Amino acid sequence: MKLIDYAKNIGLLATIALMTNVNIVQAAEGPVDKGITLQPAASEVAHDIASFHNAVLMPVMVGISLLVLVLLIYVGIKFNEKANPKPATFTHNVPLEIAWTAVPVLILIFIAIFSFPLLYKEDVTPAKFDLTVKVTGNQWYWSYEYPDADGISLTANMLSEEEAKAQNKPFQFATDAALVVPVNKVVRVQITASDVIHSWALPAFGVKIDAVPGTLNETWFKAERTGTFYGQCSEICGIRHAFMPIEIKVVTDTEYAAWLASHKTADASPVQLAQAQ
Ligand SMILES: [Cu+2]
């Protein structure tokens, strides 16, 4: 089996394992209770991250752990006081020392061969992007602007438990204004912060980027299916750090056009997700 097929199969198993665990609202994707693996990928970069994790990092980690375990057991059996009553007194072994320096370097180079192109892919927005959204982290909410669309702006505050329940949305993930983007379109994300460092993280898209005051960071994503996706601020930013979730609604082109039109006419007040449906 080719390396990549192997990765896909593992990814599929992980997805099935996750699906059985999903207990947040249907058609919404985000962290799940007792989830122990990566969230199902919804962008090419997220698929690549999953393949890298499953096909490169996992074998390396498992291999090293098993090797160390076997060595420990071997040493424990062969060189304990009973089996080896007269210990050797040498202190150096040059070939061995060269080997245990060189082998980790080779392992790191092997990992880098796969991880550097992936890092570059995540970092560099494709030359042909379809729209830009500007994300600003604030203590403790996110605000979004659409500079291409008459500067539509949204302020996304977390819904209270009662509000989330009333709207049948997951508490601590749902916000009063989802970022709405079209499916299968390259979205350039420019990100900054107004006060302290935050981090805009959406695991299903393979996106995590720091929001730094005075700096404009950039990343991108291309969502491959419609739905509602959840992420969270991933930089400890103050007392309500845990309460500034990210909600992204990926919609079809027609729905996106309708949403834009409804906002051009509406006032600039925070937008309910329901309006996008
Ligand atoms: Cu934050």
Image: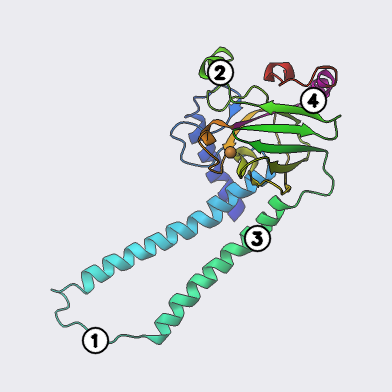
Q: Is residue 74 above or below residue 205?
A: below
Q: Earlier in the sequence, mark 2 or mark 4?
A: 2
Residue at which label 1 appears? 89
- Mark 1 Cβ inside 8 Å of ligand 1: no
Number of other residues with Cα within 10 Å of mark 3, as a class: few under 14, some 14 to 19, many 20 or more: few
What is the three-letter code of the residue carrying label 4?
Answer: Tyr
Left or right: 261, with 158 as reference point: right
Q: Say which amino acid is labelled 3.
A: Phe
- To which quarter of the image does residue 63 belong? bottom left
- Region in magenta: 245-263
Q: Nearer the viewer, mark 2 or mark 1?
A: 2
Q: Which residue is mark 2?
A: 164
Disc count in the image?
4
Secondary structure under tag 1 reads: loop
Q: Is mark 2 within 8 Å of ligand 1?
A: no
209 or 31, nearer to the observer: 209
Judged from the image, the secondary structure of the residue bearing numbered disc 3 is: helix
Spot the residue most to the top.
166
Q: Which quadrant is the C terminus positioned in?
A: top right
Asked whether residue 2 is in view, the answer is no
* Badge number at residue 256: 4
Q: In the rendered structure, which disc, 2 or 1, sits on the residue that comes first in sequence?
A: 1
Q: Residues within 10 Å of mark 4 (few under 14, many from 20)?
A: some
Mark 2–mark 1 distance (CA, rounded to whole Å): 69 Å
On whether residue 247 falls in the magenta region, the answer is yes
In this picture, residue 215 sits left or right of residue 20: right
Q: Is mark 3 within 8 Å of ligand 1?
A: no
Q: Nearer the viewer, residue 139 or 54?
A: 139
- Are the residues flagged by discs 3 and 4 in contact, CB closer than 8 Å? no
Tell me if label 4 and label 1 are in contact, CB under 8 Å: no
Mark 3 sits on what residue?
Answer: 116
Percent across and percent down for residue 10 are: 53, 45
